[in-house]
Every structure is written in C-alpha cells, then in structure tokens.
Image (tube, rainbow, N blue to C red):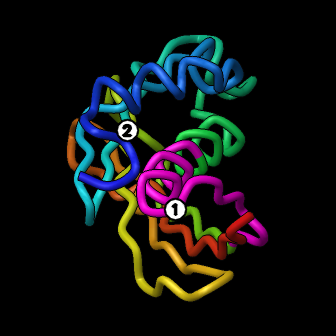
Amino acid sequence: MGVFKDIEEARAFFKGDHFATLNGAMIKELDDDACVCAMALNDGHRNARGGVMGGAIFMLADFAFAVLANNRHRYTVSESVTVHFLHGAKGNVLFAKASCRKDGRTTCIYNVDAYDDMGTDVAVFTIIGHKL
C-alpha cells in the first residue's frame, strides 16, 4: 500500500472531504495503481431533465483522483482537468476508476473513467495534479 496503510485509513482520512462524502461518494477499492469510488445516484444528483448533472460526475471523478493521488503522494491537488462526457448515466450507481498515467517530481497525470452499474461509459477525465 502507499501512504495509507490500508483502505480503512484512507476512508477515515477522506471522511474530511465533506462535499464528496455528503453527496454519497465512497471508496470501494484502493491499491498502489488504481482507485475505484462509487456513488448511489438519487434525485439530488439529477438536473431538471432527470439526467445526472455533470457536476456530480465531475465530483466523483475528482474524488477518485484525490484518493489515489494522495495515496501515492500526500498532499496532491488537481491543477487542471479535461473531461469528455460520453453518455448519460442509465444505472443507479456511478463509478469512477482512477489510474496514474505519469508520476513526476512535482506534477502527475491521472486518467479517470466514469461508468455506471449498467456498463455505460459516462465520461473520461485527464487530471493533472500538483504535489504540495
């Protein structure tokens, strides 16, 4: 394991990320190479048309990035993000899987794939992080 001795220590640390946790984001899997976070979707995540808001999808992806990046190097923050929304979420649970593409001395690049429990590819993110 990385900075966190186990997934429970990571969960305890990220309880302090109130915006993500109050919106239902949970750490499901974490190792040195990947992190999967999930969020059960509810009406609070939906826009006026009933689709899942881009901001909700973005929050979960940013949370997955934060968990993995801070497991590799505490403290790391997002510096810039590129997102491509692919399809609307059709399921009841949204997932975000983060992986490290490049881990430099002061910056890093992560890919995050967002998908739902029906297998729909919802969005892809490239996140450049800055190591504090």
Provide the residue designation for mark 1: 73
Tag 2 secondary structure: strand
**Left or right of residue 80: residue 25:** left
Is residue 16 within the magenta segment? no
**Left or right of residue 101: residue 129:** right
Is residue 69 within the magenta segment? yes
Q: Residue at x 36, y 31 (%)?
A: 27
Query: Is there a contact, CB below 8 Å, between mark 1 and mark 2?
Result: no
Provide residue 13's location: percent of width, then percent of height: 51, 26
Viewer-closest of 118 and 80: 80
The tag on residue 110 is: none
Marks 1 and 2, how far apart at CA: 18 Å
| Quadrant of the rendered image containing residue 54 | top right
In the image, which is nearer the foreground, mark 1 or mark 2? 1
Viewer-closest of 106 and 47: 106
Q: Earlier in the sequence, mark 1 or mark 2?
A: 2
Q: Residue at x 39, y 35 (%)?
A: 94
Provide residue 79's location: percent of width, then percent of height: 78, 69
The vertical placement of 88 against 49, above or below, is below
Disc 2 crowd, CA 10 A, few/some/many (<14, 14-19, 20+): many
Question: In the image, what residue type sits under mark 1?
Answer: His
Provide the residue designation for mark 2: 37
The vertical placement of 118 against 68, above or below, is above
Question: In the image, what residue type sits under mark 2?
Answer: Cys
Provide residue 118's location: percent of width, then percent of height: 21, 40
Identify the magenta region: 63-81
